[in-house]
Image: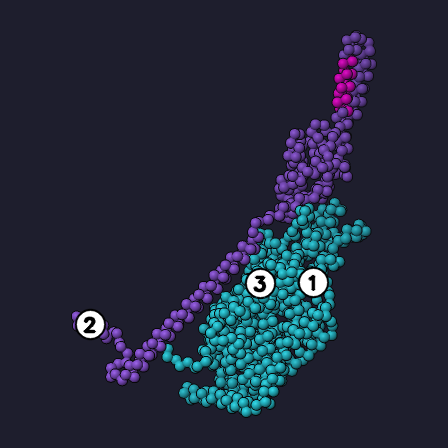
Chain colours: A cyan, B purple
Amino acid sequence: MGQTKDSGSEERPKWDNKAQYLLTCIGFAVGLGNVWRFPYLCQIYGGGAFLIPYLIALVFEGLPLLYLELAIGQRLRMGSIGVWNSITPLLGGLGIASSIVSFLISIFYNTILAWVLWYFFHSFQNPLPWSQCPLNDNLTGYNVECEKSTPVNYFWYRETLNITPDIETSGSLQWWMVICLASSWCVVYICFIKGIESMGKAVYVTATFPYLVLTIFLIRAIFLPGATDGLVYLFTPDWETLKNPQVWLDAATQIFFSLSVAFGGLIAFSSYNAERNNCERDALLVGIINSATSLYASISIFCILGFKATTGYNACLKENIMFLTNYFSDQNITVENYKQWFDHLNETFPDKVFSLNLRECDLQTFLDQSASGTGLAFIVFTEAVIEMPASQVWAILFFVMLFSLGLSSMFGNIEGVLTLINDLKFVPRWIPNELVTAILCLISFLVALIFTLGSGNYWVEVFNSYVGSVPLLIIAFFEIIAVIYIRGMKTFSEDIYFMTGRRPNIFWKACWMVISPVMLLVVLVAYVIIQAQTHPTYHTWNPDYERNPQTQVKPYPDWVFAIILLLCVVPVISIPLVAFYKLICRVRNPSATAVFRLTHRNRSSKDMESYNATMTLT
Amino acid sequence: MINLSSEIAYDSVWTGLNILQSAIISAQLRFLLSLLLSVEMLEKIILLLCCSCAVAQHLCTPDASDGYKVRLSIKTALEGQAYEWNENEMFLFRATLAFAMRNHIREQKFEVSNIIVCNETPRVSFWFVVTSPESTSVLIGKEDVEEAVRKSRNRINSAFLLTDKTLEFIGILPTLAAPVDPDTPPWLIVFGVVMGIVGAGIILLLVSSVVQKKRKNEMTDDEENCEETRVKTVENGSVGEGVYNMSFSDDERFTQM
């Protein structure tokens, strides 16, 4: 005791140990996208061949950006607002932009977690509610909407979302969704109640549990029939896809969004570190573990999808066999000799066979049924789980895994928002942190009630596609410019020398100065051009659509388009706004800015003096 | 065969008459008359029997108005453990159907013979009709048979280890299981448990942090008080130790004792 406390500055929170910090960063980076976006991309872009653009993007774009954020946060020991303010006040808007993006993403991300919770609550029943159609009102048959599609589709679109036919029909608040949303925000609050003290302990579970479940699934799935078909399908490289620029673009964006850079959360996390921490090794660890997790998850997922395709194929064959045996009163058509029997019957009685309207059964078609995002988790995977013995156990494990994956990513998002509040000192000192977090969770919950309307799923898609894409690319681009060109490569190298004892080697320098900014710019421009080329459309679930259960594609109405533009622009508008404001201030009173510059320079030189002193002592 | 036996009967009568033409007329005639009568009775009975059989066989045809087609898909249902379909299995089927009819129409005692089966195929499908136990030429109506099968469908299915889908009565829709509707949906129970734990955790953590803050405030108050006393003693300029050391005073007491 007896420490002299600076008047006005609190002790910065600290990690209990290095493992907590690493697990938090890994948990933030590893999220739902690793499980349901990466396997989908692998599948549609020619399996093993996709790994090449993916790894190139990781090495030249992902790792440098990650290293940069961790280093700058650890060095300047401030949240994202303070960091950019101290580099140059003109770019103070970067921190605000990061926090706004974090807030917008956290509100729809937690809605997805609410859906996961809903499915988790329903996994404790036998039989699983999505395995059979409910009866219709007068108990004479099955529900019509369910019969036209599948029970799994019906459970997702009708009983979970109660979805409206398009985004313009808002429907009403679904009370069951509201209480699931409330419970997921309560879980987030309880993990964040004491800041990183409680979050650091929660992360021991949320970051490690998904790996355990993925391993269990892998061991189970490998022994399912058809698992090898799925794996072969996933990893068979199709080198032709490398010629398609869309593949490279998707690889770059996947890496970028997967590593969760530019949210401000990583900067905040590394600012709680000790000053002399080897952030280079941390960045490499986090980046590589993130990509390895994506690969590991895709193996499990594709074993199960292969199993699902085989089961579907066998069911299709059995249906055809039933038709044939009923019609021809013949015997002994089995799954194995179906082909010979079918050919024989087709030759002898072609018109009769034709009149039966047999469905074409092809394993490849079943394997081609790809899905990503919520479609993978809530439709495809739940259908596969029904076929596995002891389905409740697998369903529960799967949904708990999804929940912990999403929860650990939520921590980073919430941290990004909280640093805004703490650094800008929006709230007076006497309000305790717990209350601030509670108010933040409450406000987010109230805003997220939009997503519990009938059209909520469509809004989640809007947010997912537009908030989490262009603004992040812009923020990341400005981050690199700010650190490397405004702070200066030399100063930054000195920072890293101070922290790790080594200057960054030529690879990092080349990436930071040239390769990564260029890649980011190219990705940003290409992304915007591709989005702007077509009027954006979305998939709707319309029971009256004639090709139900296929989703109907509709264009976004104009007012939704306006909202999309707003979502892209509002986060990044703060960058030029703050720059403009600070310029005007500087023009108004140049003396004040000079004083600021002097103290700023003094502070950085004082750091160097203290560093030199410690070096001579050791 | 039945026609043949009546022919033989006629032949024997005529030859008897021819052979016994010169025999004692009255006794032989009487004997012959009685023979004729019995043969005729026999004939009638035989004719009746064959008629009824023909009628019964005639009753069971594919697309009969009161008959039902049955389809069994044993291999689909049981795969490796599928049993052979033979006469005994058919007997079991007829017996279970008789049981179902008995359950439905309690007054009449249906026997296995009342269930008539025809048009059997190796795919295992056949037609059946049900005759009334009172008169074998009367068929039980379609609706009654349907009701009977519906009521005992479960028992019929389990006799053959099959389900509604694999033991099909063409034309009789499977009864849909009434949905089990618990009072509280099970998901609400799980939700309640999870929210209870989370809520309890929140309250616990909030209370513990409030208590911690209070203790910290008290401790900092105590420290401030200690600091003040320390400062005071230094300021007073006393030569002795600044802090009153309780342990020494205790020792003094003991040594005095």
The residues tagged by marks 2 and 1 sit, at their Cα atoms, a distance apart of 88 Å
| Circle 2 residue | B253
Q: Residue at 41% x, 87% y: name it.
A: A617
Image position, residue A246 (x, y; %) = 70, 74
Can residue A82 be seen here? The reply is yes
Image position, residue B128 (x, y; %) = 72, 37
Query: On the rendered image, what quadrant is the N terminus of chain A found in?
Result: bottom left
Image position, residue A561 (x, y; %) = 70, 71
Can residue A285 be seen here? The reply is no
Instruction: Mark 1: give few (<14), some (14-19) or many (20+) Cα within 10 Å.
Output: few
Which stretch did the figure color magenta? B32-47
Q: Residue at 55% x, 67% y: name it.
A: A442
Instruction: Check chain identity for marks 3 and 1: say if they share one.
Output: yes
Front one among A509 and A94: A94
Q: Amino acid at mark 1?
A: Thr
Q: Secondary structure at mark 1?
A: loop
Chain containing the residue with disc 3? A
Q: Secondary structure at mark 3?
A: helix
Q: Amino acid at mark 3?
A: Leu
Chain containing the residue with disc 1? A
Q: In the rendered view, would you say A507 is above or below A343?
A: below
Q: Nearer the viewer, mark 2 or mark 1?
A: 1
Q: In the rendered view, would you say A352 is above or below A554?
A: above
Q: Secondary structure at mark 2?
A: helix
The residues tagged by marks 3 and 2 sit, at their Cα atoms, a distance apart of 68 Å
Query: On the rendered image, what quadrant is the C terminus of chain A found in?
Result: bottom left
Instruction: Check chain identity for marks 3 and 2: say if they share one.
Output: no
Q: How many marks?
A: 3
Determine the image quadrant of residue A239: bottom right
Q: Residue at 53% x, 88% y: name it.
A: A596
| Circle 3 residue | A181
| Circle 1 residue | A169
